[in-house]
Amino acid sequence: MNRQSLRVSGLLFCLCLCVGLVGPGCNDDSVSPDPVVSPYLPATSAANLLDNLITAMVEKNSTEYEKLFDQDEFTFRFDPVDLQGDGDLPEYWGFEGEARWSRNAFGSSDVRRVELDFMKGPLLDTTEEDGEFVDLSWKKMTVTGVHLELETQNPADPTDPVIFLVSGDRAQFFFSIDEEHTIGGQPTWKIVEWRDIRVEGRPTLTEGKTFGAIKYLYF
């Protein structure tokens, strides 16, 4: 091979090498996409669970919503005034009822928007005064100023939606702690009971309801 052939071969080698360096996966200018950060907090505290409850409802995410509750022990208890006013309401339901209403509501094309907010109270120990079905190893928290808006499609006029509203009510949550299942060395929590509590004297509003009454619409 003469000197000119060697020179051509060398140029071809360099060209192939450069092409290989800038090929797929080797481009120095490529930027890896940022990892998606979950809006949900780890289930390591009662406060985190309630923050996740708000997020799941606003996002209409029934999968994340269901993760908050203990599938074996969970109970939702309707407000006593609702029970007196509507004979069709059950006194309570379990996890399957909670999952059913959330799937029906969040998966409905008629539900346009969900907003939820409340003020969390202190985390307390349970006592015998909480009722015979409450485990004394559980913790409890009362939330106040519950504000829920569930905006739905109005069949008569799509430009004028119907908004079901909870304004100023309370709720009491009970939590169990699982020391055997941990995240970052911290035990995980589940909601085991949710009590809907109507506040007397709240403003009278169009389509105003309790949380439980709105849930039952999608049961």
Image (cartoon, rainbow, N blue to C red):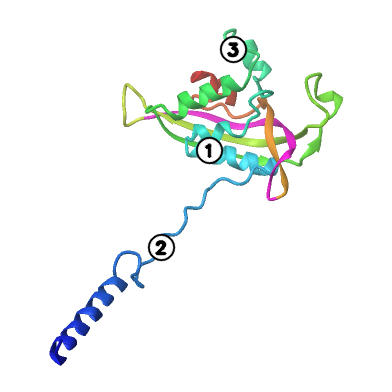
Nearest to viewer (mark 2 / mark 1):
2
In the picture of the structure, the residue carrying the numbered disc 3 is: 89
- The amino acid type of the residue labelled 1 equals Ala
Mark closest to the chain's N terminus, 1 or 3: 1
Mark 1 or mark 3, which is nearer to you? 1
Distance between mark 3 and mark 2 Cα atoms: 53 Å
Identify which residue, 121 or 193, lies in the foreground.
193
Q: Main secondary structure of the magenta part?
A: strand
Q: Position of residue 67 (x, y in %)?
A: 59, 34
Q: Quadrant of residue 117?
A: top right
Tell me which numbered mark, 3 or 2, is placed earlier along the sequence.
Answer: 2
The disc at residue 56 is 1
Frontmost residue, 94 versus 119: 94
Q: Which comes before the other along the chain, label 2 or label 1?
A: 2
The residue indicated by pointer 2 is 32
* Residue 180: x %, y % from top left: 74, 38
